[in-house]
Image (cartoon, rainbow, N blue to C red):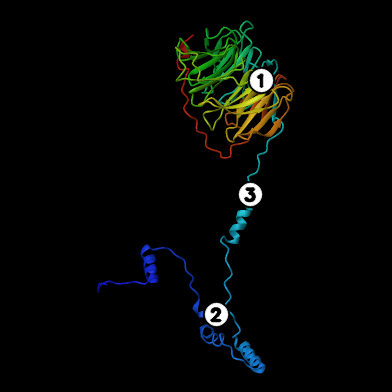
Amino acid sequence: MDAGSVTCSPARHQILRRKSSQENLDRFIPNRSAMDFDYAHYMLTQSKKGKENPVASSPAKEAYRKLLADSLGMNRTRILAFRNKPPTPRDAVPSEWSSVQQAKPVKARRYIPQTSERTLDAPDIQDDYYLNLLDWGSGNVLAIALGNTVYLWDAADGNTSELVTVDDDVGPVTSVKWAPDGRHISVGLNNSEVQLWDSTSNKLLRTLRGCHQSRVGSMDWNNHILTTGGMDGRIVNNDVRIRAHIVETYSGHHQEVCGLKWSASGQQLASGGNDNLLHIWDRSVASVNSRSRWLHRLEDHTAAVKALAWCPFQGNLLASGGGGGDKCIKFWNTHTGACLNSVDTGSQVCALLWNQNERELLSSHGFTQNQLTLWKYPSMVKMAELTGHTSRVLFMAQSPDGCTVATAAGDETLRFWNVFGSPEVAAKATRKAVPEPFANVNRIR
């Protein structure tokens, strides 16, 4: 071995290795002031003497030894014994904190009123499943078509006004739909025409002709595009800014189109018809040259598909409801066309609305209970059933704040339900700039 070499014992090598690696190891450090080192030394040295070769002693001597050991405290069996008691263990969480945690209130279940908060008369409303006669605009004004007349009810002050009464040869009114700006409204007629009105001035801006060959029972807006669906099975996109308003036509239904809903992105259109078909159209796929190029053709429903609702918290989720021969609510992934779930409601599904603040879905029904059903999504557990209408609840509309729902039925009543409650967080109203699609309408007749 070289003179300069240094050897280390295994224990020392282990200690050096630990120090060099800077391992964070816990070790017990006793309180030396609490130890009896004299007794410990005696027990380690003297007490072991004679154990291997015991020396016989008299009973008197043994008794004296035991008495002396008791007096001097020498009968302990433990060597490392502490004079002081071990400290009382402390809770990991202070008791006052734990009590606060236990006292934290559980989120209370939202109260859902079982009766409508307001009821208005709706005489002469048509008891027709395929029409869409009720809509609530972003300006907080409700539009309802009763026979040949469209009435406007201002939710802010409760005042009712008449927008238009059409002649018998063009009526009755078969659909109404507010534009995104909450000021302009489209009125579909039984004679296949569509009128565009300015609700502020009660002025007819223009009439769209040539779109359909029979009544227009469904409509929806996508910015400046008004999409109309007719009894002839046609779906027409109308650009209301230009004179030649028909820009696209979708052909896929062979019976009346009774449901139309654009997605929030404005990219996909869902259409339901009396032919039991549900189509998903994509604007990037469908065009004038390929007007039959639907994205998905869904044939799972066994009755007319009128009730359609796009999910507000998942852009590619669509809920659809079937008529009396189907009675099902189905959920679709519109990117893949897959049916995610199907729930048998037991009655005709007339309309669907999503809660804007919670994961809930509201459905309105026809025979036999004529009820509203609130479902928890995605479990589809019934949260409440609201009754009051004595005829099928054909039409539903949601207030701009998403809290109140208006329903109209064949019993000629209009009811208002506080079914969705109030938003948990009251945010300041920030109104988005809405494109003005009617800038040039006044010059077009």
Q: Residue furthest top?
A: 169
Q: Residue furthest left?
A: 3
Q: Which amino acid, mark 1?
A: Gly
Q: Earlier in the sequence, mark 1 or mark 3?
A: 3
Which residue is under mark 2? 79
Under circle 1, the secondary element is loop
Q: Residues within 10 Å of mark 2 (few under 14, many from 20)?
A: some
Q: Residues within 10 Å of mark 3 (few under 14, many from 20)?
A: few
| Residue contact between numbered discs 1 and 3, judged by CB atoms under 8 Å | no
Distance between mark 1 and mark 3 Cα atoms: 43 Å
Q: Residue at x 64, y 93 (%)?
A: 64
Q: Earlier in the sequence, mark 3 or mark 2?
A: 2
Which residue is under mark 3? 105
Across and down, in percent, residue 108 comes to 65, 43
Comparing 401 with 60, the one in front is: 60
| Residue contact between numbered discs 3 and 2, judged by CB atoms under 8 Å | no
Comparing 370 with 173, the one in front is: 370
Q: Which amino acid, mark 3?
A: Pro
Q: Is residue 184 visible?
A: no
Q: Residue at x 64, y 14 (%)?
A: 149
Q: Which amino acid, mark 2?
A: Ile
